[in-house]
Amino acid sequence: MNKIARFILFDILKNKIVILYTILLFIISWSVLGLENNYTKATLSLLNIVLLVVPLVSIIFSTIYVYNSSQFVELLLSQPIPRSKVWFNIFLGLSTALVLAFLVGCGIPILLYSSIKTGMSLIIIGIFLSIIFTSLAMLAAIFSRDRAKGIGISIFIWMFFAIIYDGILLILMFQFADYPIEGIMATLAAINPIGLSRIFVLLQLDVAAMLGQAGAIFKQVFGSGGGMGISLVILLIWSVVPFLWSLIKFNKKDL
């Protein structure tokens, strides 16, 4: 990690919002895992919280930070530093800070109270979601110069993957219930990083009743081991592709 990424990392770690986010995650994780006697129920409760809170905070905070750093970016670009290096280091600093906040907030209680297998799956999806939605935030920010519009795009992205997508999937399932659409539904389930993260953890728990129809189809098509491997590959693609797209846009953008 070079000087630019380190500067951004330490700047974010001192941010009051990130500190509050870390403390909030820690309190919630400790309460859910420490006070609930039913291990499976506690894991599912924490999973639902992580799937909502981590993407929301990651995408909103990252979008605002990119807009607030516009003058800093212009200053860096006035130096003999390649554009791609500047943009990558902003992404690296942002994603690392949010991953560290998640690891401190959720990782410690998970390692203390959860089993190694399920606990690691929760930590893995938390890390991926932090990186993915930071990547999506940078893409949203580069698409619009207007701060309000960029934040609006970020909120819509979160709402689409967290709420709207499941509704669309449910409608498709009911409309085409009489057709052999298992492969199509498995593919559609893999498109949503939040839904895919849920399926990844539930496959570890092997709670068939909680998978839902999309998750059950995913398990049926790929199997538990294969499904988890494919999930990780797709989450990795989600982490990289939006950032690369934003990098291409940034390199062409007239600042």
Image (spheres, rainbow, N blue to C red):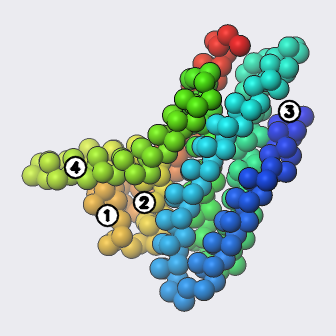
* Amino acid at dot 4: Ile
Image quadrant of residue 21?
bottom right
Residue 63 location (% of width, % of height): 64, 37
Q: Which mark lies nearer to you, 3 or 2? A: 3
Question: Does dot 1 land on a helix, a strand or a loop?
Answer: helix
Q: CA separation, marks 3 and 4?
A: 47 Å
CB atoms of marks 3 and 1 within 8 Å: no
Give the residue pinned by disc 3.
4
Pick whichever of labels 3 and 1 is earlier in the sequence: 3
- Where 109 sits versus 14, above or below? below
**Residue at 45 percent of width and 46 percent of height:** 159
Give the residue pinned by disc 4.
171
* Amino acid at dot 2: Ile
CB atoms of marks 4 and 1 within 8 Å: no
- Where 147 sits versus 177, above or below? above
Q: CA separation, marks 4 and 2?
A: 19 Å
Pick whichever of labels 3 and 2 is earlier in the sequence: 3
**Residue at 56 percent of width and 50 percent of height:** 55
Pick whichever of labels 3 and 4 is earlier in the sequence: 3
- Where 105 sits versus 179, above or below? below
Give the residue pinned by disc 2.
199
Give the residue pinned by disc 1.
212
Crowd class of label 2 (few under 14; some 14 to 19; many from 20; radius 10 Å): many
* Amino acid at dot 3: Ile
Crowd class of label 4 (few under 14; some 14 to 19; many from 20; radius 10 Å): few
Residue 180 in sight from this viewpoint: no
Q: Which residue is the extreme one toward the left? A: 178
